[in-house]
Amino acid sequence: MTDQSQRDQPVSDQPAFTAEVYQNEYLPADGTVVDAVITVAASGAVSTGPLSAAQVIMIDSSGSMANPPTKMAAAKMATTTAIDTLRDGVAFAVISGRARATMVYPYAPELRLASPQTRAEAKQAVARLSADGGTAIGTWLYQANQLFATSSAKVKHAIMLTDGRDQHESRQDLLAILRACEGRFICDSRGIGNDWVADELRLVASTLLGTADGLENPADLPAAFRSMTEIAMGKSQTDVSLRVWTPANSTIQFVKQVYPQVEDLTARRTTVSPRIGDYPTGAWGAGESRDYHVSVAVPAGSVGEEMLAARVSVATGGDVMSSSLVLATWTDDMALSTKINQRVAHYTGQAELAAAIQEGLAARDAGDIETATSKLGRAVQLAASSGHEDTAKLLGRVVDVVDERTGTVRLKQRVAGVDAELANVRSVKTIRVKKAQQ
Amino acid sequence: MADPGTSSSTAAAPVPPLVLPERLEPARCPRCGDTSDPKARFCEACGHDFAGQDGTVPAPLVADTSGQEADFAAARIATSANPPARCAGCDGTGFAAQPDGGTYCENCGKRRAAGRPHAEADLEVIAVASDIGKRHHHNEDAFGIVRLPQAYAGVVCDGVSSSSRADTASHAAADAATRAFARTLDTSPADSGDAQATIAATIAATMAAVDAAQAAAASAGSDQAAQSGGPPGRERRPDIANPASTTFVSAVVTPDAVTIGWVGDSRAYWLAEDGEAACLTVDDTLGSQLAAAGIEVSEATPNAAALTRWLGSDATDTVPHVASFAPSGPGRVIVCSDGLFRYAPEAAALAAVTSKGTAIDVARALVQFALDAGGGDNVTVIVMPYPPAVPTAEEDPAAQNPAARNPAAQATPQPKDQPR
């Protein structure tokens, strides 16, 4: 029996987080896989005043930024806008990125606290920036990491802007530096111009729990920089983990963030105890809401049995803020066991959509027309059926759609390079279940 | 179990010769459920060590709350509501460490049952035995018995197996009803000498007990709802298709009458010492209701066995059927779940397999009869003699010394001779 008074859950009047489970708990007699979508929301009550923050802006200053000159001008304007967006007292620095990283502001490798004076000095330094040299993103990140290490700010946020391929370092070097930076700061990566590489932007953002995107029009840069800075300044809870308890003899198949973008967290588990693992989710702002898809394989039970397949909590530091139960009940009632939860189905589709786009574009680059056509056709079909209009539009720049319902497409003969990269970098962006579908 | 999918009145199975077991427990292994030798140290089937940390063999539960509540100081009661300490899935004791209030095992995740696979209670003149049977994972049958100086009451609740966590509703309902009986019968004029007043009091007590049972069953079901939509920050669980629900049957035995109350398809029988036998209840099933109205119903009729009434958060009609009768001579009232009467539905058939003996012996023997006949369902049997034994001065502290009607005086009931 469940006795309310026996529960020893800490109950606060205004919880910082809520976690809501969506699943069909009913499994057929031989069923072993339990899927659930957990919607985690940071309530408006999270904020206890703004958290201390630090921000580093990395501007690609390689030679290609001068061609066309509007790119460098827009990058400078955007950096200036971001500097103006910083609250007084936020520690900041600006780095110029080439084959090596150099300090733009301040001159010494350190952070400065934002004030009218330091903002003015920083903007002057940014104005003097010129485009020249190569691209090695890892060295920029390394420098940012060194700067953040000197700060005790709660929120450490970086913006990385690049216009080209990361060509002056090896992939291994970049991966090693990313590993060193992981968990130290959050980084949003942005591409400008026609030559950036979606996979690189996604790798940086994914590892450093930020967002990746490409900007088609240099004129959009200042607004994007302001927005990223504002969001970072608005973070009110850092080091938030998804804490997952699973029973003995079960296997976690995956833990994925599925909204606002697909992020597979499965491999990023930190063991808390034999039954409990933490998955990093970074920093949260008040009112933010994200969805997670957890899939657990449990030993088959017999009809009538019920078990707890997972307990999903939100943990910050040592505190468990909220938790939800993912259940499994075995039944011989087909009407119950064959139902697929709407949200689970939706996000399974969204994850497949992201994978289909990435695999389709990779096949296209490799010259495998057949695979590319099939994968991108499936992507068109999934985007249409889930009502993901933005992605449908992007796909329309890569393929000619014959029938979106059946996923019949033809690869476009001439595609601007940036269109494929845009489709790729935005492939992970998901939408929530449309109201009409619910 | 009141399983709407199975017929509750199939033809009587051939009655096997009745053998009274010397000792029923331990009937089965707590880990694998296999029937085990009472003297064995290890389970023959799975090797489970019966001599666990918390004792030796899995002893039957008797939750005797005699005198623990001032409300019904003169009553001795026993109910089945007592969740097991060890997990049926992994045999661990992970319930305590679990933040859900012990609902799930912290090690293997299995849900904790509300009651035990096998439970018995013996208040000397009245007794009950209950067993999980051979097909089910939980004992969704629940019971409670009350013994007062001049009145007995017994309650059986059978969780509806098609509802979620039926055992939570049945055990909560039986426990609440039993306590309600103890409270009301303790203060009602059972020994006033006015038969009409006594019968009216037992009927009122039955109505109150069903109210208490319904409230408890509904809150067991809505606990689930509270968890799915409760305040944020608490443990939550997703929506449940069918809230927990249960049947209810009770009998009150006083010197003047036997009063029966029921909702659903659990039954009460009267077995007179002179051989007369009768089923006192009419099942709340489509088939039984039609038959009672004189309409021929084929056993094959779809939904003939479907329950028409039950207790629980989704129940709409919970007013019990109540019947009272004055037996012409001594006999026994049997209150039971369909796990018993599916194997002997006719009163005469049940009488034929009911042995003579003490209440606990008869209860155990009838449970064993059902297990031997197939044990297809949970089985629970309460045995109460009529008329109630007139308490001797030695037996009734209240009669001996009214001032002694307090918990301390009643806390350790003295062993006494069988009153028959």
Image (spheres, coloured by chain):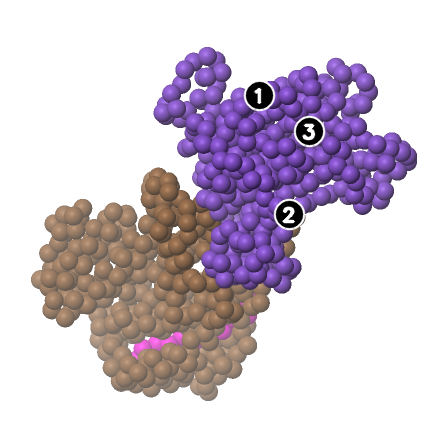
Camera-nearest label, 3 or 2: 3
Dot 2 or dot 1: first in sequence order is 2
Q: Earlier in the sequence, mark 3 or mark 2?
A: 2
Q: Residue at x 41, y 70 (%)?
A: A268
Q: Is residue A12 visible?
A: no
Magenta segment boundaries in residue numbering: A49-62
Q: Is residue A51 magenta?
A: yes
Residue B18 x, y percent position in the rendering? 54, 37
Q: Residue at x 67, y 45 (%)?
A: B62
Find chain B in the image and tell me its colour: purple
C-alpha span from label 2 to label 1: 31 Å
Chain of residue at mark 2:
B
Residue B278: mark in rendering: 1
Label 1: chain letter? B
> Which of the chains bears the disc numbered 3?
B
Q: Nearer the viewer, mark 2 or mark 1?
A: 1
Q: Amino acid at mark 2?
A: Leu
Q: Mark 2 sits on what residue?
A: B61
Question: From mark 1 to mark 3, how far is it between C-alphas?
Answer: 15 Å
Callout 3 crowding tier (Cα within 10 Å): few <14, some 14–19, many ≥20: many
Circle 2: element type = loop
Whether residue B336 is visible, yes or no, is yes
Q: Quadrant of residue A169?
A: bottom left
The picture's colour for chain A is brown
Asked if the residue at tag 3 contacts the one at tag 1, i.e. Cβ–Cβ closer than 8 Å, the answer is no
Q: Secondary structure at mark 1?
A: strand
Check contact, mark 2 vs mark 1: CB within 8 A: no
Residue behind mark 3: B385
Residue A23 to residue B214: above or below = below
| A357 left or right, relative to B283 | left
